[in-house]
Amino acid sequence: MSSFQEMYKRYFMLSVAVVFIYAVCAALTSHSLFFLSLATGSLLGLFNLWSMYRDTQAATDFERSNKVAFALRMPARIASGIVIAMLFLQFPEYFGIVPLAVGLMTPYLIILFSLVFFAFSSD
């Protein structure tokens, strides 16, 4: 297995763990709107992470076969942001826009923090 696939699996599993933590916090605390919004946004963030992984895999496969790569997953990632906006506009009593957006960014924040952590830990 390539290191890219291992990194993807690690980021995916960390993101799933964070979604689980958000869901447990939504069930156990009085701030359920905040944590439910974080969990929902993180689920859409997991979709974005998977989509980014598939795009990278497709580009790698096309590069190996000397073909032109064309991916339609970027509009799908943009659509997840639109879904978040629509969720907030339709159900403002159940979702907050800031926690939804932060939840959407959760997998990217995990990637950022792990890269920073591993960059400083290798010295």
Image (cartoon, rainbow, N blue to C red):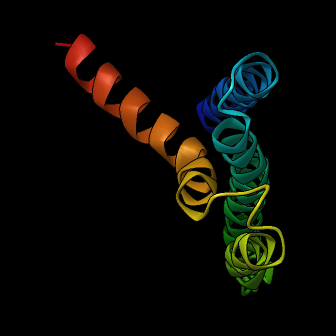
Residue 122: give x, y in percent of width and height.
25, 13
Q: Is residue 1 above or below residue 108?
A: above
Residue 54: give x, y in percent of width and height.
78, 59
**Who's the residue at 77% across and 15% down the image?**
28
Q: Quadrant of the N terminus?
A: top right
Residue 83: give x, y in percent of width and height.
79, 75
**Who's the residue at 74% across and 40% down the image?**
39
Q: Quadrant of the C terminus?
A: top left
Q: Is residue 116 above or below residue 60?
A: above
Residue 122 in sight:
no
| 71 and 77: which is toward the camera | 77
| 115 and 1: which is toward the camera | 115
Q: Is residue 108 left or right of residue 33?
A: left
Q: Is residue 34 above or below residue 22?
A: below
Residue 117: give x, y in percent of width and height.
32, 21
Q: Is residue 89 above or below residue 44?
A: below
| 113 and 104: which is toward the camera | 104
**Who's the residue at 42% across and 27% down the image?**
114
Q: How many marks?
A: 0
| 89 and 85: which is toward the camera | 89
Q: Is residue 83 left or right of residue 123?
A: right
**Who's the residue at 82% across and 68% down the image?**
91
